[in-house]
Image (spheres, grey):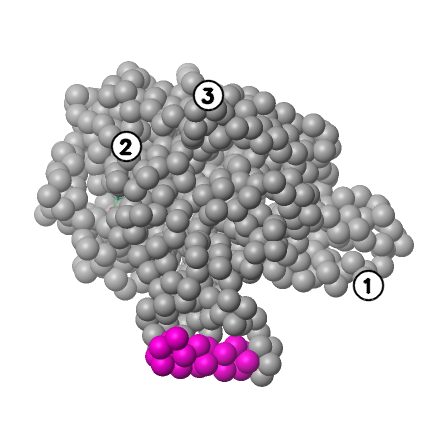
């Protein structure tokens, strides 16, 4: 070992001793950070001593897959170094290597954050990178998914010998594999699984030609068997395929076919897990083990013995027959999987914890992309509790799902248990930083909690809504949601929910029509139109779609039509959006122009606007800088510096007759009901209906608004 490496290791040892012994904290990252400071190449130096290694990345399932793969690789007594606790940045991997060095491990198995692959792969040069999936997640950190794809592709280019074992069912992963020369090992589920498709998909368009993809079947999210009808790009032939997938009462069972050789080799796998996502994780771990040079002889034993990391999916039995199931979900796709589990168990009590700390992402818009409405299927849902730093936002989300049960704001699990019936089960779903405190509390409660003697607390914060009298209209208000299949990046469905529910709660008849890509656009009797936000690629697809239809939209706007255009949708209404050299032709409906900057404007925003009596609050995340022409007026003035249209002139959005354009994305309306009501009021007046909008009980909306305002103006 050269002196520099040795010093870096000793300093890291000291840092570990300091953080664990003196500060009583986990020594996951700090020692690695110290080692990297002294020797930036330490991952390479210590990694070179390994005979072979694999790295696992992707949005969901990294920790589980890595832990399982490490166990499988070590099944025959091989010493494996692994960052098991989930510290998956460069420092976490360096720390694991430093800590394990004296045991002289020969095999490495590491979980790596998507954006850190580009720092880790070139140094470690693993045998394989296992790419599990890519879903929208922490977009305020990752930017748009395209950026994550670019980073992973670059990492692979800088480690050309590394094979990429990728989830071929995910077009976003397959697109990366098609861009690099590294050997590819596609895996996937090679038969329909008949699950209900999620509302949101993160990839609807062909990575090669941008045409909408056709699916023979979808498992969930964008995962399935796809093909581009225009250029023929399709799911690659699978090298490893899960087949005969069946769900028994114990969990999923399936065969993994290794189709690489002349003869297909079959591995039968039985799991204790009932989520289909675990089929992917288990298959990926098996593939990692094979590519990492392990033997799969003991794979089933390893799987049977595997304990998921710290409390994930665990059931805690409490005094009095009560039980609490703890689940982690960090993004819409993960959350939807957990909702599926609550449905399968016909749950009656649910607690959702939402934090917005650095590791969670500060933007909580994604909760509007969760298919929470599916909890309506439960036969007897009694109560939904919401906790965490952004519980008010979650409360509003639950309210708009109209689950027909009380919503309680709570501090922790013990607080939630007050609302749970005697001896019943509570299903907890918590996001990243909200999860460890939940587990810690449950560990404590499992030994000390005493079941209450009296009845469960009854809610004071919920009242059954009275049926309003129907407002007489010659025809319902027609809300048109344009291209939700393309422009839906940050929970745009929340805006539709706010518009339609606030009409319904006042007895104003309304209907929502979606216009999907490729469908005829008819705005003749539209009253409110919504254009959502989108990633650059999606915007480009919509721009092509809309070019022939410009006149319809222009005529609608000229006629005073009400239109809410968010981020990408807002940019499309102008003359152009320049993404580097590429010009996305705008619709020229508004006199505004947008040019992408080299950085993104990301963060909580508050805007003072004439549209609404209190500041409009929300979150922005865009590369585009928009300049308004002389005749256009901004929607308002950004109260937070460096935000808004361009970060320079303090203006945010545009207000042009009935058009509201804004960078406050996704669910701007639920937290700003004043803006919703402005849009509804204006649409009614355009129809000649002069109706005073009855006030609604907006307590939860107001709470969520105030929390967001405080964060925007204080952080
Ligand atoms: N892709 C556009 C940008 O980055 C719009 C993003 C959005 O809709 N938030 O500027």
Q: Position of residue 152 (x, y in %)?
A: 32, 48
Looking at the figure, which quarter contains the C terminus?
Answer: bottom left
Residue displayed at 32% across by 39% down: 183
Q: Position of residue 696 (x, y in %)?
A: 53, 41
Q: Earlier in the sequence, mark 1 or mark 2?
A: 2
Badge 1 marks a residue whose secondary structure is: helix
Badge 3 marks a residue whose secondary structure is: strand
Q: CA distance from mark 3 to mark 2?
A: 18 Å
Give the residue pinned by disc 2.
207
Residue 245, above or below 701: above
Residue 279, above or below 580: above
Residue 356, above or below 251: below
Give the residue pinned by disc 3.
217
Q: What stretch of residues is rendered in magenta?
A: 1-19
Q: Position of residue 451 (x, y in %)?
A: 85, 55
Give the residue pinned by disc 1.
448
Q: CA distance from mark 1 to mark 2?
A: 54 Å
Q: Nearer the viewer, mark 1 or mark 2?
A: 2
Q: Is residue 160 visible?
A: yes
Q: Quadrant of ligand 1?
A: top left
Residue 50, above or below 17: above
Assess whether mark 1 and mark 3 are in contact (beta carbons under 8 angstroms): no
* Label 2 Cα neighbours within 10 Å, binned few <14 / some 14-19 / many ≥20: many
Residue displayed at 53% across by 58% down: 80
The residue most toward the right is: 453
Main secondary structure of the magenta stretch: helix
Q: Mark 1: is the Cβ under 8 angstroms from ligand 1? A: no
Residue displayed at 41% across by 79% down: 6
């Amino acid at each position: 070992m050269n002196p520099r490496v040795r010093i870096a290791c000793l300093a890291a040892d000291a840092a570990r001793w300091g953080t664990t012994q003196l500060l009583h904290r986990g020594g996951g990252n700090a020692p690695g950070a110290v080692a990297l400071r002294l020797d930036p190449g330490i991952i390479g130096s210590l990694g070179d001593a390994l005979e072979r290694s694999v790295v696992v990345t992707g949005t969901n399932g990294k920790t589980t897959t890595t832990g399982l793969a490490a166990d499988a690789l070590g099944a025959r007594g091989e010493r494996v170094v692994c960052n098991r606790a989930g510290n998956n940045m460069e420092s976490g991997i360096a720390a694991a290597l430093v800590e394990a060095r004296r045991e002289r491990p020969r095999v490495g198995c590491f979980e790596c954050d998507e954006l850190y692959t580009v720092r880790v792969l070139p140094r470690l040069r693993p045998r394989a990178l296992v790419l599990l999936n890519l879903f929208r997640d922490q977009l305020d950190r990752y930017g748009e998914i395209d950026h994550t794809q670019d980073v992973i592709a670059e990492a692979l280019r800088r480690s050309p010998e590394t094979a990429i074992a990728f989830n071929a069912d995910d077009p976003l992963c397959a697109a990366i594999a098609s861009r690099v020369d590294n050997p590819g090992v596609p895996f996937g589920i090679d038969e329909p699984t008949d699950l209900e498709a999620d509302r949101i998909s993160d990839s609807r368009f062909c990575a090669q030609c941008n045409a909408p993809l056709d699916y023979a079947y979808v498992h969930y999210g964008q995962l399935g068997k796809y093909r581009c009808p225009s250029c023929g790009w399709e799911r690659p032939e699978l090298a490893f395929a899960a087949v005969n997938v069946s769900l028994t009462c114990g969990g999923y069972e399936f065969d993994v076919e290794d189709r690489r050789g002349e003869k297909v080799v079959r591995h039968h796998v039985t799991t204790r897990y009932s989520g289909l996502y675990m089929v992917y994780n288990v298959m990926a771990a098996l593939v990692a083990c094979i590519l990492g040079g392990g033997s799969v002889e003991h794979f089933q034993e390893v799987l049977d013995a595997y304990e998921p990391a710290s409390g994930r999916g665990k059931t805690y039995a409490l005094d009095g027959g009560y039980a609490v199931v703890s689940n982690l979900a960090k993004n819409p796709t993960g959350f939807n999987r957990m909702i599926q589990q609550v449905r399968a168990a016909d749950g009656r009590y649910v607690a959702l914890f939402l934090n917005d700390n650095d590791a969670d992402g500060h933007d909580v818009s994604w909760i509007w992309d969760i298919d929470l409405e599916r909890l309506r299927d439960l036969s007897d849902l009694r109560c939904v509790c919401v906790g965490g730093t952004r519980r008010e936002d979650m409360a509003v989300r639950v309210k708009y799902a109209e689950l027909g049960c009380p919503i309680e704001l709570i501090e922790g699990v013990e607080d939630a248990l007050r609302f749970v019936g005697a001896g019943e089960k509570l299903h907890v779903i918590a996001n990243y930083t909200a999860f460890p405190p939940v587990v810690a509390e449950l560990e404590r409660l499992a030994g000390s909690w005493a079941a209450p003697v009296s009845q469960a607390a009854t809610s004071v914060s919920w009242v059954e809504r009275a049926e309003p009298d129907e407002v007489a209209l010659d025809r319902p208000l027609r809300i048109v949601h344009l291209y939700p299949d393309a422009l839906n990046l940050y929970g745009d469905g929340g805006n539709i929910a706010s518009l339609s529910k606030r009409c319904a709660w006042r007895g104003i008849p309304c209907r929502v029509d979606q216009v999907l890509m490729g469908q005829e656009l008819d705005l003749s009797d539209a009253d409110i139109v919504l254009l959502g936000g989108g990633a650059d690629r999606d915007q480009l697809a919509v721009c092509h779609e809309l070019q022939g239809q410009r006149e319809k939209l222009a005529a609608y706007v000229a006629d005073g039509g009400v239109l809410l255009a968010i981020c990408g949708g807002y940019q499309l209404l102008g003359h152009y959006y320049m993404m580097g050299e590429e010009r996305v032709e705008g619709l020229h409906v508004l006199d505004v122009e947008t040019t992408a900057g080299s950085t993104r404007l990301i963060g909580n925003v508050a805007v003072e606007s004439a549209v609404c009596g209190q500041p409009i609050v929300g979150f922005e995340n865009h590369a585009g800088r928009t300049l308004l022409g002389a005749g256009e007026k901004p929607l308002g003035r950004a109260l937070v510096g460096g935000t808004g249209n361009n970060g320079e002139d303090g203006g945010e959005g545009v207000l042009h007759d009935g058009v509201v354009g804004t960078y406050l994305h996704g669910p701007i309306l639920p937290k700003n009901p004043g803006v919703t009501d402005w849009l509804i009021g204006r649409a009614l007046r355009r129809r000649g209906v002069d109706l005073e909008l009855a006030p609604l009980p907006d307590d939860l909306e107001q709470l969520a608004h105030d929390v967001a305002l405080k964060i925007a103006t204080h952080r």
